[in-house]
Amino acid sequence: MKIPGKTRFIVLIASIILLQSCTKAAEGSDAAPPAPELPVYTVITSPATTYQEFPTALEGKSNVEIRSQVDGYLDRIYVEEGAYVRAGQPLFKIDSRSYGEQMNMAQANLQAANANIEKARVEVDRLQPLVSAKVVSDVQLKTAKANYAAAVAAASQAKASVGNAKINVGFTTITAPVSGYIGRIPYKKGSLISRTDPNPLTLLSDISEIYAYFSLSELDFIAFQNKYPGASLEEKLKNMPMVELVIADNSIYPEKGKMSIVDGQFDKTTGAISVRAVFPNVHGTLRTGNTGRVRMPQLISNAVVIPQESTFEIQDKTYVYVLGKDKKVTSKPIKISGKTDSYYFISEGLAPGEKIVYTGIGNLKDGASIRPKAISSDSLLRAKPL
């Protein structure tokens, strides 16, 4: 059948319009992909404990330089480097022969002085009746009494020399003044030891307790004073909770410590004040020279809690993406007051009940639409406890 020309023209126009419509539809599907489905977390409040950390240097309860109080050759070394010793235990022996002879000489001088006392007493006893009978002048008796007093004084001096010689002999055996661990021993047997040596024989560390020294800035110190009850600084320290110690491998030391003292004044150069926490160290795990971080706890009754992975930073400020009622997201700055391993505690910027994007925020922009997938805060807290 032959189609009229006018009809063929109408069919051609309709085909062109249909083809353009299909092309535009195809182009429109490429330009507007579906909104991404992202997990959304509802902001909650929860009791939590935050920690403020301060770098610290550790020292033993006492670190004693062991030095000789007499000169001489090192005759014996009774201990090994790193050994644990108890108070009073012998550590070193200085050759004592010359000091023994000095003591023998001092004892001989004391015996001679005692003999002179007896001789002077005999002379006084002999002259007293003669002076009474006016046979001899009393000047001789006064001279005899003066000689007797001089003999007594000489004997006292000789006795002191004996005591000093005994002390020197005792100093030749060097004992531990406290219990602790022996450090490096730079001298060997036969070394000439002097009281003026720049280096000690060894260093003895009592580490039954460990002192963790760290610094508080002026603002931290004021906050510390305002945070804990008490009329004086000592009372505030007593009311402060126990602190923790993070050691070099980032693990928590099993024993908790107590804040002990605060320095008397701020350092003018650093604007900080030194404080000390005391940790028990019964097993000797910690040693002088170790480093770590002191963690001071702070209890928050109703902390605004969000996961750390829900945040991002721009120019030293922290943001989250908040979900609006139109299912579009908007970036919002927040202020962090504390943290745990998995969560941030927010002091400003968010309120309980607001919804934020949990993960997948890397490609988001302000005003972007998403398909929210709600995440239960209870399930999240069970998977990652506070």
Image (cartoon, grey):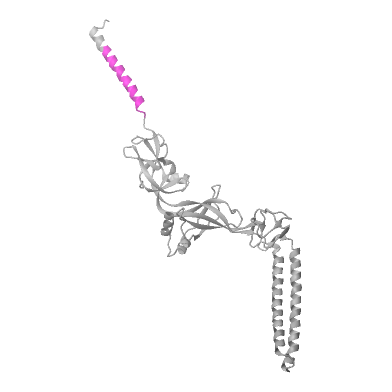
The answer to which of 257 and 85 lies nearer the viewer is 85
In the picture shown, does residue 102 fall above or below 368? below
Judged left or right of residue 283, residue 6 is: left
Q: Main secondary structure of the magenta part?
A: helix
Q: What segment is highlighted magenta in the picture?
A: 11-33
Judged left or right of residue 15, residue 313 is: right
In the picture shown, does residue 159 fall above or below 72? below
The answer to which of 255 and 2 lies nearer the viewer is 255
Is 151 colored magenta in this rendering?
Answer: no
* Residue at the bottom extreme, as displayed: 133
In the picture shown, does residue 106 fall above or below 5? below
- Please say whether residue 73 is visible from this viewpoint: yes
* Residue at the left extreme, as displayed: 6
- Give the percent coordinates (x, y) of residue 47: 42, 52
The answer to which of 344 and 352 lies nearer the viewer is 344
Q: Quadrant of residue 163?
A: bottom right
In the picture shown, does residue 273 fall above or below 343? below
Q: Residue at x 23, y 9 (%)?
A: 6
Judged left or right of residue 230, residue 141 is: right
Is 17 colored magenta in this rendering?
Answer: yes
* Residue at the top extreme, as displayed: 2
- Give the percent coordinates (x, y) of residue 136: 74, 91
- Give the percent coordinates (x, y) of residue 101: 76, 67
Judged left or right of residue 180, residue 300 is: left
Q: Residue at x 36, y 35 (%)?
A: 365
Q: Quadrant of residue 157?
A: bottom right
- Please say whether residue 89 is visible from this viewpoint: no
- Give the percent coordinates (x, y) of residue 3: 26, 7
Q: Residue at x 29, y 17 (%)?
A: 18
